[in-house]
Image (cartoon, rainbow, N blue to C red):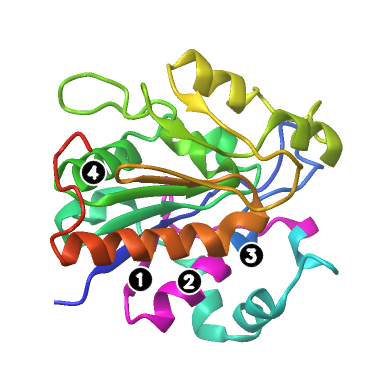
Amino acid sequence: MTPRILHVVTNVAHYADPDQPTGLWLGELTHAWQVFAARGYEQCLVSPAGGASPLEPRALKWPLLDSTAKSWLADPASMARLASTAHPDELAAADFAAIYFTGGHGVMWDFPDSAGLQRLTREIFEQGGVVSSVCHGYCGLLNTRLSDGRLLVEGRRLTGYAWIEEVLAGVAGKVPYNVEEQMRRRGAHYEKGWLPFTSKVVSDGRLVTGQNPQSARATAMQVVALLKAIAAGTGDLRKDA
């Protein structure tokens, strides 16, 4: 059976101010989707509430709109996937080898406290699968606990969108919390690159995280490498790895 990868996208279309739009940062999905598709992985989209996932307008403009995102926008089948994502309750973790949390500022509102996403993440991880995120996607890992009650991120090395990047992007005053700080409060060992907006990926066992949109492709490549190692029996299959 071909391994399947579950992409998580947001349902939130705006900041606290409804006149300030946000949503999925499309390139963080399309870069990873292209990497996984080229290697024969089946893929599925899920969101906290199911249904439509809105797109972050800033990611749809030059120079941020690259060829992978353009191809997705031009493909009716791809856009239909974003219009009708699965609800977590419709999915079984046993069907997936990895979960990949995409970003965009919308996820800061609907990822952290989604019981359905927490269930899928916990079960995928505890069955020996890979948990991964890019950019703000790591908001989806903030409150996920393992079966023994421990936070999944506690004591683990990870990365995600840095506070300095929020400041430089001009949105620090719009976001509901500092996720970098929140991760540290949960006992995670947060890391970031020397330069903002450059690719950085951190792997800690079967947890793979990328810092920003520029890290999406490299994050997906690391997920692939880990899945291959697990399939070959050279990866660490311990439940707590």
* Secondary structure beneath label 3: helix
Q: Is residue 170 visible?
A: no
Q: Amino acid at mark 4?
A: Phe
Where is mark 4, residue-wise? 125
The residue indicated by pointer 2 is 33
Q: Secondary structure at mark 1?
A: strand
The quadrant of the rendering that contains the C terminus is: top left
What is the x, y in percent for residue 228?
A: 26, 67
Tag 4 near tag 2, CB within 8 Å: no
Measured in 3D between alpha carbons, the distance from the residue under mark 1 to the one under mark 3, in whole angstroms, is 16 Å
Which element is circle 4 on?
Answer: helix
Q: Quarter of the image for the N terminus: give it.
A: bottom left
Determine crowd level at label 3: few under 14, some 14-19, many 20+ residues with C-alpha closer than 10 A: many
Q: Earlier in the sequence, mark 4 or mark 2?
A: 2
Which residue corresponds to the image point at 30% horizontal and 46% vertical from the top-left?
A: 206
Q: Are marks 1 and 2 in contact (CB under 8 Å)?
A: yes
Q: Label 4: how many residues lie within 10 Å, few (<14), some (14-19) or many (20+)?
A: many
Instruction: State the image coordinates of residue 97 (x, y, percent, origin top left).
Output: 24, 59
Task: Give the residues drawn in magenta, as a range.
Answer: 29-58
Question: Is residue 44 toward the left or the right of residue 64 in the image?
Answer: left
What residue is disc 3 on?
A: 27
